Image (cartoon, rainbow, N blue to C red):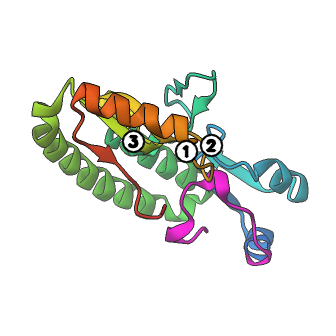
Amino acid sequence: MTPAITGCLHDYSMTADDMKHLEKADLFLINGAGMESFMEKTAQRFPSLKTAELSAGIPLIQDREGNMNPHVWVSVENMIRMTHTCADVLAASDRAHEADYRKNEKKYAAALSALKAEMDREMKSFKGKKIVTFHEAFPYFAKEYGLEIAAVVEREPGSEPSAKELADTVKTVRSSGIRVLFAEPQYP
């Protein structure tokens, strides 16, 4: 429903067009895990709309402030699990097309499994390395590939780091010899 340039769904606000789509919807698939901050209002506006959380059953990573990190799909393994959850939900909601959902599930899960095998090979030599991330989106990726997140530039989406926070990040980078910054193209 959201455009590709949306960035993190934490920042997203429902539009009038979104509401029109939801009025006609039988099912609303969401990431879950607290990602969609607009869901409370959406649930109030559409109390009979069936919603399914694709992150259901995935162990969540807690941040330093005690919040659960909802960026589960950044792990290829988690994305494979989400693919199976999505197919299960769609098949249960629309039995007439269950075979199509299962066929697509197998095809997409196979493509993700191939990507995971490639990533496993490519990332093997980086295990134990420290990285800096622009945003709090990478803990699941880091865990999957044995990376250590030494610093995060922007802890909250849309909130610029203070001069002290930037200085601390630069100090961490220099003292640790970090050479990788994970960035997201949709952010400045």
**Quadrant of the rendered structure where residue 16 is?**
bottom right
Instruction: Give the labeled residue for mark 2.
Output: 32
Q: Kindly indicate whether the residue at mark 2 contacts the one at mark 1 (C-beta within 8 angstroms).
A: yes
Q: Is residue 34 magenta?
A: no
Closer to the chain start, of discs 1 and 3, is 1
Question: The residue tagged with tag 2: helix, strand or loop?
Answer: loop
What residue lies at 41% left-to-right and 35% top-to-bottom?
A: 169
Instruction: Give the labeled residue for mark 1.
Output: 54
| Residue 167 spot, x, y in % from top left | 45, 36
Instruction: Give the labeled residue for mark 3.
Output: 133
How many residues crowd around disc 2 within 10 Å: few (fewer than 14), some, or many (20 or more)? some
* Dot in front, 1 or 3: 3
- Which of the image's four quarters has the N terminus? bottom right
Mark number for residue 62?
A: none
How many residues crowd around disc 1 within 10 Å: few (fewer than 14), some, or many (20 or more)? many
Residue 108 versus residue 73: which sits nearer the camera? 73
User: Does residue 82 appear anywhere in the picture?
Assistant: yes
127 horizontally vs 142: left or right: left
69 horizontally vs 148: left or right: right
Looking at numbered disc 1 in the image, what kind of residue is underneath it? Answer: Leu
Looking at numbered disc 3 in the image, what kind of residue is underneath it? Answer: Thr
What residue lies at 52% left-to-right and 35% top-to-bottom?
A: 165
**Quadrant of the rendered structure where residue 147 is?**
top left
Above or below, comparing residue 8 to residue 124 in the picture: below
What segment is highlighted magenta in the picture?
A: 1-17
What residue lies at 38% left-to-right and 52% top-to-bottom?
A: 183
